Amino acid sequence: MEYNVHTLPNGIRLLHVPSASAISHACIIINSGSRDEKSEQSGLAHFIEHLVFKRTEKRNTNQILNRLESVGADLNAYTTKEYTCIHASFLNPYLDRTLELFNDIIFHSTFPEDELEKEKSVILDEIASYLDQPEEAIYDDFEDLVFAGHPLGRNILGTTESVNKLNKKDIKEFIKENYHTDKIVIAVLGNYALNKVVRIGSKHYAEIPANLHIQTRVAPSLVPAVTQTFQKPIQQAHAIMGAQAYSLHHPYKTGLLLLNNLLGGTGMSSILNLQIREKYGIAYTIETGYSPLSDTGIFSLYFGTDKEKVARAWSLILKEFKKIKDNPLSEVQLQKAKNKFIGQIALGEENRIGLIVAMAKSLIDYDNIDSLETVFKKIQDVSTTDMANIANEILDESNLTSLTFYPLG
């Protein structure tokens, strides 16, 4: 896909992706997330993401929310362990309005004390709601085991104790220390000429003072695999297994993405879904996931089932792992897996807001954005030997941490 990048003097990059649609999509991505918090400030990055919608130097909450919604646009945000993202979808005439609002909420929020206290209550409710969903909460507990003692193991939402302690001073210091202008991308996908995007982007962002990045992140250490079980007041059992995996920059990243999709990724035809759910009727949900990060990654397998079926499910899953380790994929099997994965990626391009966010992240992570043709070539270049090596490393039972929540009684 065609794209252009313009770098402002302060390091902020403007990403322009032309599109013939009447609908535009834009985002501002900041390479800062929960892993950049101090241990006593858990939940701070997510707290800031909430608060930027509350009050700026010239707008109150209603004015912020209505600035785009009044013209039918959609505005939203999220925080991950490594990013903060504000994004919007809107009709083409409202590009200037959108980029100006991004500027206002990111660089001119005032964080008044009354809003801090109100938003703490909202986030505490969010934490309570999250903990009431064991299929979600188990992932955080699992990551805390895999990344033991490291910021990547902490819950993005924080804890009740840490959120209650957050204050305006924490917010100001975090933004100063982590919102680096050369790690910020403003991306626009829409029916505009490049010079228009540069002109509007420069108008709103060229005067932001430079705050250049200094590497402070520390990669997590590998920790020994553990097996843990807990009883909880739940109806079904929930189980997860996995380990640290390849980073964004590892040569086996594409191969593991492919293996993950083959084992338990998108669709009902994954190996584990066919074998565990369809063949044996065990596990109403079974899926694998792989999230590559800047200096590490995490691979996981999750399933939910009746507590009486957990042991049988683990046995069958490990049997499938052993089969794929001991019996490397044939060229025909691998090509089928590649065709499926490539098709899913191509269809994913139709999600325009997802596409522009992914391109902005790629610019931050790699200083480059691969074309679809390049992405497909990387997938096609994965060999049966690569897949065998990856399977034997990632699915090595001795390295797999497991966590199971059982119903009480």
Image: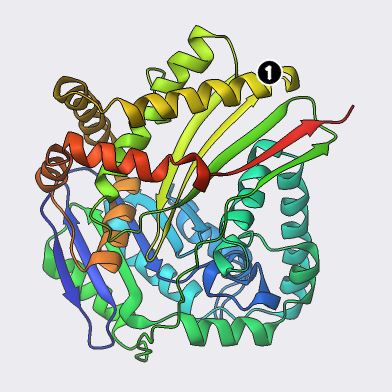
* Number of numbered discs overlaid on the protein picture: 1
Identify the residue at image location x=49%, y=8%. Answer: 279
Residue 248 in picture, x, y percent from top left:
32, 58
State left or right for residue 186 relative to residue 60. Answer: left
Q: Which residue is farthest right?
A: 409
Instruction: Quadrant for residue 256, please give it.
Output: top left
State left or right for residue 288 relative to residue 40. Answer: left
Q: Label 1 amino acid?
A: Lys
Q: Nearer the viewer, residue 162 or 277?
A: 277
Identify the residue at image location x=72%, y=59%. Answer: 123
Instruction: Assess disc 1: are there few (<14), some (14-19) or many (≥20) residues with their C-alpha within 10 Å of its C-alpha.
Output: some
Identify the residue at image location x=36%, y=54%. Answer: 246
Q: Nearer the viewer, residue 94 or 194?
A: 194
Q: Report whether residue 351 is seen.
A: no
Residue 300 in picture, x, y percent from top left:
50, 42
Residue 316 in picture, x, y percent from top left:
53, 20
Instruction: Quadrant for residue 283, please give it.
Output: top right
Instruction: Quadrant for residue 211, please give it.
Output: bottom left
Q: Which residue is mark 1?
A: 309
In the depicted structure, whether residue 322 falls above or below residue 17: above
Identify the image quadrant of the C terminus.
Answer: top right
Residue 175 in picture, x, y percent from top left:
52, 82
